[in-house]
Image (cartoon, helix red, strand yellow):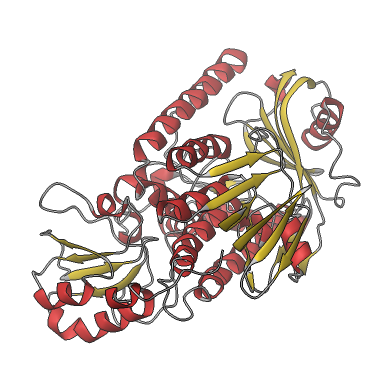
Amino acid sequence: MNYDVVVAGAGPVGLMLACELRLAGVDVLVVERLTEVDTTVKAGAINSPTAEALYRRGLLPELEEIQRENLERFASFTRQRMATDGQPPARAPKFAGHFAGIMLSGDLLDEADPDLTAAGPAGEVGFIPQISLELLLARRAAELGVELRRGVELTGLDAADDHVTVHLGDETVRAGWLVGCDGGRSTVRKLAGFDFPGTAPGITGRQAVVEMEGSERLKTGWNWTPTGTYAHGPVPGRILTVEFDGPPADRDTPVTAEELQTSLRTVSGVDDVTVTRVHSATRFTDNARQASDYRKGRVLLAGDAAHVHSPFGGQGLNLGIGDAVNLGWKLAATVRGRAPEGLLDTYTTERHPIGAWVLQWTRAQVALMRPESHASALRDVVAELTGTVDATTYFVKKISGVWQCYDIPGNHPLVGRSAPDLELADGSRLADHLHDGRGVLLDLAGSREARGAAEGRVKVVTARSSSELGGLLVRPDGIVAWAAASDVAAALPDLDAALARWFVPHASLACASPAAG
């Protein structure tokens, strides 16, 4: 069988990419070696770019419901702690995050900072566990008609100049493109020969949801001890331990109750805590590596297949979703013959620096968490800093991803950044006009010339807003490609250049031929 794109891996990244491709009319097959959705405990939250991406595809109501349910679980945990140790119940936190386990207080956040107010309603959701997001995206993919095959493993590939032959056990399919979203030990990455430089692991981490006896002596939140680091909460039974004596001898054996109990006792110093049942458990390390290029011909990488690092700070899930949203529209345009020259190459140039930053951010946290005197002294300094509004706002902006900006040509400060979710006079918001995954020219100044330049390339929306902007050109991934103040006429040459850089003109569509598939 022939497909435009085969995606290996049906985790959140693979599913998000498949949804983006299918939204643009691409024939996509997703293959996943697991027979069911992986319910292992993983990331516990999403950041602003991820929330905005889902909001722009009309999924905000589902996110709000997921967050409501998880805040109720947090409240249940605090009530449980109060019943066992008499602690007063904590109020549900405003999502702020942590750095190396040093919690950031939402009460110290400068909420007037413009970078933290531009996301609109998406800025109010964050407490979204990875499993919940994966289930949401699986439903979304099914609604869009994505073909998903579970229990199917990619075993080989043969890449040619105009297609990729993908071996799925005894079956062979032909694809125009292959994208590896198959995790940190990616088969696609290895078979295609991507290099993967980085730093070796030095820790063993374990994260689990368990049932315990004697847990009342465990401190909640993140804790440092002479033997490592552990966390307890913020939902019932959730534990995390980190030991700094090297990577695990075997990453593949199941994590047992005995292993978790031994690690928890070692790190916490609570000798009588007993793990009686394991609901979900995983090991992790601080192995930090990144492919030098995310593309080799017709084979691409996204998510953990392109970069691995420790999970501290919850960056991995969000980094992968960002890859998928950036790649999706570009690959779809390439498949359908609507991509300007070099468009697909911008995937690596835009996303690689973001991935490199995340690797450094997580390495810094591992260094800060080490159970030795120099790291302990530095933790005290950082903890003192995070007691200020400026430092808390700095860390939250980094963790939340609102700092992210692609280095693309343009003369307005918004170019390369996530588009502000402007509220329009008709009651709609900018995000409402991005549900179909198309680029949008938002004309706020009634410029006939701007609309004429954009017609046939992107959706044109003429509206009024209290914003001082005269217009915005927004890519399908929500990134501003052009912006103008009130004097739109002076910025028209920049608009023409941006349209040519990111979108082909309507006249070219008639003679364009889709990529081989």
Residue 313 horizontal/vertical position (percent): 59, 51
Above or below: residue 272 compared with residue 65: above
Above or below: residue 484 compared with residue 383: below
Above or below: residue 157 compared with residue 219: below
Compared across the picture, whether 252 is left or right of 381 comes to right
Q: Is residue 380 visible?
A: no
Residue at screen point 77% across, 56% down: 373
Residue at screen point 83% across, 35% down: 263
Q: How many marks?
A: 0
Residue at screen point 44% across, 77% down: 407
Residue 282 horizontal/vertical position (percent): 74, 38
Q: Is residue 320 visible?
A: yes
Residue 363 horizontal/vertical position (percent): 69, 61
Compared across the picture, whether 96 is left or right of 32 comes to left
Judge by depth and name the residue closer to the eye, 454 or 315.
Answer: 454
Judge by depth and name the residue closer to the eye, 473 or 91.
Answer: 473
